[in-house]
């Protein structure tokens, strides 16, 4: 069963715009991760945020985590056509070392 | 390291046939995961191993599915007999520890059962 639910399911923006997607989850976590999947490829890790962190940055990526609301957001600033992909959040539970539960993903299309 | 290597990349088989998917994790990684991805159900964790031992196989859909990890550098996922509803992309992933760390995914095996 899926732990995370991404919102929106799909997002279409133009190059240079920012893309924001959200992830909500149901049970306690010790970390939340975001992955990208290009069409026909495997998932690639983008960023990890621990449950005791509230915000994290990596290049053009900004992730927030609100454990009281059981939600996270991923912001991609100044998007590029190469950012076109599906983005997934994944949660790790405190009592299940290494096990990640993935959400359904947000499909992002960035047009030049 | 070449990353997680899966074979074959594509597999087309007839219903009732046995299918074996293979995975070579990144050297030194203690954890290995098998996921299945479909449009309807998204990305599902089927089973994962720690130091070659199965830890949680609660995601394995039926007894037709089995997974082994005979050594630290090789794992198989077998479906016998295969059914059309098994058609999906199967991913193998590995991670260096079971703690708070990322998973490294292979390119996946696209399975089509006709």
Image: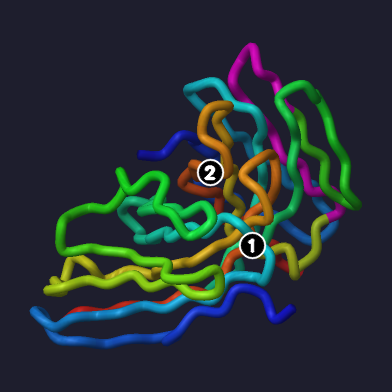
A26 relative to B113 in the view: left or right = right
Could you say whether the residue bearing mark 1 is in a helix, strand or loop? Answer: strand
Where's residue B2, x and y in %?
Answer: 70, 81
Instruction: Tell me which segment is drawn in magenta.
Output: A65-78
The image shows residue B65, relative to residue A57, as above or below, that is below
* Residue topped by disc 1: B104
Could you say whether the residue bearing mark 2 is in a helix, strand or loop? Answer: strand
B114 relative to B109 in the view: left or right = left
Magenta-drawn stretch contains B49? no
Answer yes or no: are tags 1 and 2 on the same subunit.
no
Residue drawn 15% across the image and 57% down it:
B63
* Residue topped by disc 2: A100
Quadrant location of the C terminus of chain A in the rendered image: bottom right
Residue drawn 31% across the image and 54% down it:
B40
The image shows residue B20, relative to residue B100, as above or below, that is below
The foreground one among B26 and B13 is B26
Label 2: few (<14), some (14–19) or many (≥20) C-alpha neighbours in 10 Å: many
Residue furthest to the left: B16
The foreground one among A45 and A95 is A95
Magenta-drawn stretch contains A77? yes
Quadrant location of the N terminus of chain A in the rendered image: top left
Residue furthest to the right: A59
Where's residue A3, x and y in %?
Answer: 46, 34
Numbered circle sitting on residue A24: none
Q: How far is mark 1 from mark 2, CA to CA?
A: 12 Å
| Subunit under mark 2 | A
């Amino acid at each position: 069963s899926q732990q995370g639910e991404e919102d929106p399911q799909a997002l279409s923006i133009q190059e240079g715009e920012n893309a924001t997607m959200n992830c909500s989850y149901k049970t306690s976590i010790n970390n939340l991760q975001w992955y990208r999947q290009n069409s026909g490829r495997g998932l690639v890790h983008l960023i990890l945020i621990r449950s005791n962190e509230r915000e994290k940055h990596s290049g053009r990526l900004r992730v927030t985590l609100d454990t009281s609301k059981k939600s996270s957001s991923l912001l991609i600033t100044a998007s590029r056509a190469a950012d076109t992909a599906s983005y997934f959040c994944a949660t790790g539970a405190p009592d299940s070392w290494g096990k990640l539960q993935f959400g359904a993903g947000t499909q992002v299309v960035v047009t030049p | 390291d070449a990353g997680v290597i899966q074979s074959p990349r594509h597999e087309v088989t007839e219903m009732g046939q046995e299918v074996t998917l293979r995975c070579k994790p990144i050297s030194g990684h203690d954890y290995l995961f098998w996921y299945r991805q479909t449009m309807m159900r998204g990305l599902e964790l089927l089973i994962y191993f720690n130091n070659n031992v199965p830890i949680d196989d609660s995601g394995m859909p039926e007894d037709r599915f089995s997974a082994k990890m005979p050594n630290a550098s090789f794992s198989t996922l077998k479906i016998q007999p295969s059914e059309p509803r098994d058609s999906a992309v199967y991913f193998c992933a590995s991670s260096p520890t079971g703690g708070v760390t990322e998973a490294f995914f292979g390119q996946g095996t696209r399975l089509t059962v006709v």
